[in-house]
Every structure is written in structure tokens, then in C-alpha cells.
Amino acid sequence: MERKTECEIVQDLLLGYVDGVLNAESKKLVEKHLSECEKCRKKLEDIRKDIKENENNQKKEIDYLKKIRRKSRIKSILIALGIILLILLGIYLYQLITICSISNKAENSLSSNNFYKETTDIIGEGETVVTRTYYKEGKYKSISEIYTEEGIETSFTEYATVDSDESIRIQEENKKITVEKGEFTKMANKEENLKGVNLPFDTNSFILKLGTAFIMSINTDTFQVGKEYYVLNNRFERAKNWEMWIDKETGLPIKIINREGRKRFYTGTRVVKEVNDNIQEYKYEFGTVTDEDVAVPDINSLNEYTIEYINDEDLIQQ
């Protein structure tokens, strides 16, 4: 076996020398030889240069991989955000379409010249107000009753015609007839008032529909009613105290719930005596009203009633 020269031995030790892993004796040998040998010093410079280039290349590769990972992470986040925005946009468009559908159905339903509407307002403390409206071809009759534990406490019936400046109100409990005339009565007898619907948006305003679709959450249910209806809530109200049920077929309200919406106080104080839910229920029928339902009675033949004629402008001035 050929014996290695000192240069070969030192060159074999140069990597260990650069890495600092040689023992003291080997390190001393290498340094002594390097101080005397130009060839081995050049070899050492080449090794250090190669190591530095490798480190730079590795750093570039690491930086490149980090850059790739960063771009990939940003891309994943953007994709996730895009998916979320698409889902939110899809939900919003669904709700906007639903709101527009409800509006169109409500307008179509109340374009009828023959309908019956019943409103039940549960006001608490054992009192419930029921209003029944019969409408046929511009004529209407409205019956309002207050129910208590003792029965019907107050009842009156009102007759009028669309755009007429006159209305007739008959009160049963005190046998009194009030004939009211004037411009304010005419305004109250506008068809849009008689056919008004209690929805959380103006059926004629697309801007309000856009806002309603953003504010409201819309779900579908069949509970209590026996057929599908929409349930509207304010998505930004944590307690979810307000709720509206809307008939899916007609676009008209079935029930409005305002939980703990009515408070009563002890007389002369702000101390709460009672908290009740404010609930309104609605019922509609179409094509069932007859001429007899809206016929105005001959008030002059009702001898047991007293008749009072009023100009509504005089009431406003008073």
C-alpha cells in the first residue's frame, strides 16, 4: 500500500478542520502544514468557497420554499374567503329573491276585490282585540271587538266605500251611530289603506327590499299552522324577540310575535307590574264575501240608536 504524503493527509483533514471537529493534535498538524504549503492553503480556500456556495444555494432553496408555502397559504386563504363570500352572496340572493316573491304574492293576493281579513291582537291582562274586515268591490265593513273574561266588552261596526268622504260607525253597547264626513275620512278610505299589509318592508320599494334581505334571516317551518310558512327574524337581534310568520302561498302575514313587547307599570311609577308578549294573528279568505256582508243598514230605521253627525275637520280643530 502506498503511503500517503503529508499533503494528502492534511487535505483529508481539511473538511474536519473547517467544521471544527478535529482534536487539538490534528488541528495543530493541519495549521502547521498550511503555514508552509501554498497548495493546501488553496485547497482550503476552495473548500470554504464551496461550502459557502452550498450554504447560499441551500438558503436560496429554503427561501424559495418559504415563498412557495407563503403564496400557497395566501392562495388557500383567498380561496376560503372566496368560498365564504360566494356562500354569503348565495344566501343573500336567496333571501332577496324570497323577499321579492313574498312582496309579489302579497300584492297579487290583495289585488282581489273580494276578501275577508281577521286580525287578533292579544294585548294582555285577559284582553284580546279582534277586528274582522269584509271587503267587496270597493265597499267594506269592519267589526272591532274587545274580549275579556266577562265576554265582549266593546264592539263597534264601521261601514264605508273606497274614496268616499263618509263613514258610518255603529256602537252596540251604547246604541250610538256616528256618521263622520270630511277629507280625513276620505284619506282613511283610500284603497291602499284598506288593502295595506303588515310586512317589514315596503312592497313598492326595491331599495327597502335590498335592506330587508340583508337584515332578516328567513327560514321555513310548518309548526302550528299545518302548512309551510316563512319565519322572519332580525339576524342582528341576539334575543330573537321579534318574529314574523308569512304564508308561503299568499305572501301575507300569519302571525307577528314580539316577546316581552308589552309592559305594564304600577300607577304613577316606572316599576314593572307585568310583562306580556305582544302577539298579532292574521287570517285571510278570498272570494267569500257577499253583498249582504258589506250592505249598509238603513240607520234611520234603527229607532233605538242615537245618531251623531260629525265633520272630521272640526274634530281636528278641537
Image: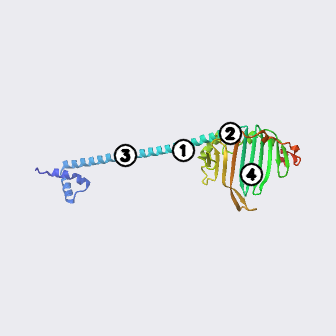
Q: How far apart are marks 4 and 2 (CA)?
A: 24 Å
Task: Tell which tag, 3 or 2, sits nearer the viewer.
Answer: 2
Q: Are discs 4 and 2 less than 8 Å apart at CB?
A: no
Q: Which is nearer the N-term, disc 4 or disc 3? A: 3
Using the image, tell me which numbered label, if any, was put on residue 158.
none
Amino acid carrying mark 3 in the image: Leu
Amino acid carrying mark 2 in the image: Ser
Q: x%, y% of residue 318?
A: 84, 49
Q: Residue under label 4, please give it.
A: 129
Q: Which is nearer the N-term, disc 4 or disc 2? A: 2
Q: In this view, does 122 lie to the left or right of 235?
A: right
Task: Tell which tag, 4 or 1, sits nearer the viewer.
Answer: 4
Q: Residue under label 1, please give it.
A: 88
Which image quadrant for residue 180? Answer: top right
Q: Classify 10 Å Cα crowding around label 2: few (below 14), some (14-19), many (20 and above).
A: some
- Which secondary structure, mark 2? helix
- Which secondary structure, mark 1? helix
Amino acid carrying mark 1 in the image: Leu
Q: Residue under label 3, please give it.
A: 65
Q: Which is nearer the N-term, disc 3 or disc 2? A: 3
Residue, x 64% and y 51% (percent of image)? 242
Q: Classify 10 Å Cα crowding around label 4: few (below 14), some (14-19), many (20 and above).
A: some
Above/below status of 242 relative to 159: below
Q: x%, y% of residue 175?
A: 85, 50
Task: Tell which tag, 2 or 1, sits nearer the viewer.
Answer: 2
- Which secondary structure, mark 4? strand
Q: Which is nearer the N-term, disc 4 or disc 1? A: 1
Q: x%, y% of residue 195?
A: 72, 41
Q: Which is nearer the N-term, disc 2 or disc 1? A: 1
